[in-house]
Every structure is written in structure tokens, then in C-alpha cells.
Image: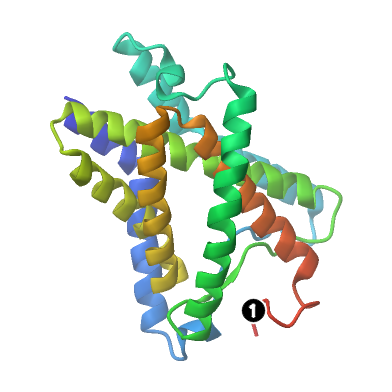
Amino acid sequence: MLRTETLLVLALSLGASAVSSLISFIGALTRPGALKEQAATLNGSYAPGRPWLDLAWQLFGITTALVPVLLVAHLLSREGAPGLRVLGFDRTRPGGDTARGVLVAAGIGSAGLAFYLAAQAGGFNLTVQPEALPDVWWKFPVLILSAVQNAVVEEVIVLAYLLRRLDRLGWSPWGALAASSVLRGSYHLYQGIGGFIGNMVMGAVFVLLYRRWGRVGPLVVAHSLLDIVAFGGYALLAGKVGWLPTPA
């Protein structure tokens, strides 16, 4: 039952994203031109030229992406656990979770940016375009919401929930670490080999920190900050600094 439950949760969320990412990567490899000459857009417009309709679609996408997290909370509560609190996703330690998250984001963010620039320059990565939204009033609020949604979905499901289930299924700690980190890298494969490796390493670090702290809250904070800086920083700097790659 636990194995079936885990597979279904992943099939409805980031497991499906991993398959989609693999198909996208194969398409990029078989398309004429080098990988770095192609773009991977993360936050694009759903209705160009129609800002209110676009906003409605943006909010719809963010909201529905969180449904698998609610499903996880429901499944955990059915087994007698206090929902997401058993994973350390609650408001009992806001100061500690935030402080730890900021430190993790600072350490991973600088290394991650350097790795991405090297991978893109070496032709192992597509040019990642973190945002391509129109310059409207809701642009930055939506980017922040998108960043937080990414963090909650990924860390709750691929980190805390998956490790809890694999532990109960009898997996070794190192086997569970490998499964979680490889899955994280897989659904970033649409960015290229660099995106796969970089996120797999980040996933391994996050597994070790989660095991040590027993709380996913700090890692949700760290991931949120990483994406907020990536999305917002790109929106502010793209085309204005020479070191930041942009689509041709």
C-alpha cells in the first residue's frame, strides 16, 4: 500500500515532471544547434497582451500545483500523523527555520550560480530564462508566489515525504538519499546536463540537512530564497550585465 501510494503521489506531481523533463531534454538534444543556443523558460506568459487573463492563469497554475502537497498532508493525517507537522513544516520555529534557511541559501546560491555559468558556457546546459513575464504590476508578486510554490512542492514531496515513505519501506539511508537526489535532478533535466547534476548535488545536501535537523521548514525557506533571487534577479539584470546569459 505504501509503495503504491508513493508512486501515485509522484505520478501526480514531480515524478510526472521528471518524465516531461526527459522528453524535453531529448527534444533539445535532437534539435539543430548547441544546447546553450536554446532557451529553457521557467515563468512565461500564458496570455500575451491580456494581463488580467494572464494573471488568472498564473494564479491558477500556482494554486493547482500545490494540490499534491495537500494530498500528502491528507495521507499523513490518515495514518495518525499530525499532517505536515510531522515533516517539520509548521510555524513552531519561525526564527530558527528562517535563520537556517538563509544560511543554506547563501551557501548554495553562490556555488549554484557559478556552476550554471560554467555549464552553460561549456555547452552542457540550455540558457535558462527564469522569467519572461510582461512588465505589469503583478510581475514580481507572481514571481515570488511561484518561487514559494516550487519550494513547498519540491521539499515537502521529494524530500520529506519521499524519505519518510522510503524509510518505512525498508530502504537504506544512502539508497533513499540517492533516490531523492536523482529524482530532483531528473525533473530539472529540461535545463540540460548542468541542471541535472547541479540539482542532484543540491538534493543530496538537502537530504543530509533534513536528516540532521528533522525539519523540512528551513529547506523550504532556503529553496524559496534561491528561486526568489533567481527570478527577481534575472528580471532586474537581464540585458543589463554582460555575465548573465540571455536567449539569443
Q: How many numbered discs?
A: 1
**Relative to residue 48, is residue 99 drawn left or right?**
left
Residue 91 x, y percent position in the rendering: 59, 19
Whole-percent x, y for residue 191 in the image: 47, 69
Quadrant in which residue 86 is drawn: top left
Observer able to see residue 241:
yes
Residue bearing the label numbered 1: 245
Quarter of the image that includes the N terminus = top left
Dot 1 lies on which element?
loop
Callout 1 amino acid: Pro
Q: Could you tell me residue 209's position as x and y percent? A: 41, 39
Q: Is residue 86 left or right of residue 53?
A: left
Residue in the image at 40% along x and 27% along y: 214
Q: Residue 181 in the image: state x and y as whole percent.
A: 33, 51
Residue furthest to the bottom in view is 33
Question: Camera-side residue: 113 or 136?
Answer: 113
Position of 93 with respect to 200 (left or right) is: right
10 Å crowding of disc 1: few (<14), some (14-19), many (20+): some
Measured along the vertical axis of the image, is residue 71 above or below residue 24? Answer: above
Residue found 81% across the figure and 77% down from its top: 240
Question: Which residue is at the front of the view, 112 or 60?
Answer: 112
* Closer-to-camera residue (60/120): 120
Instruction: Tell me if 39 is positioned left or right of 35 in this view.
Output: right
Vertical comparison of 52 with 245: above or below: above
Q: Quadrant of the C terminus?
A: bottom right
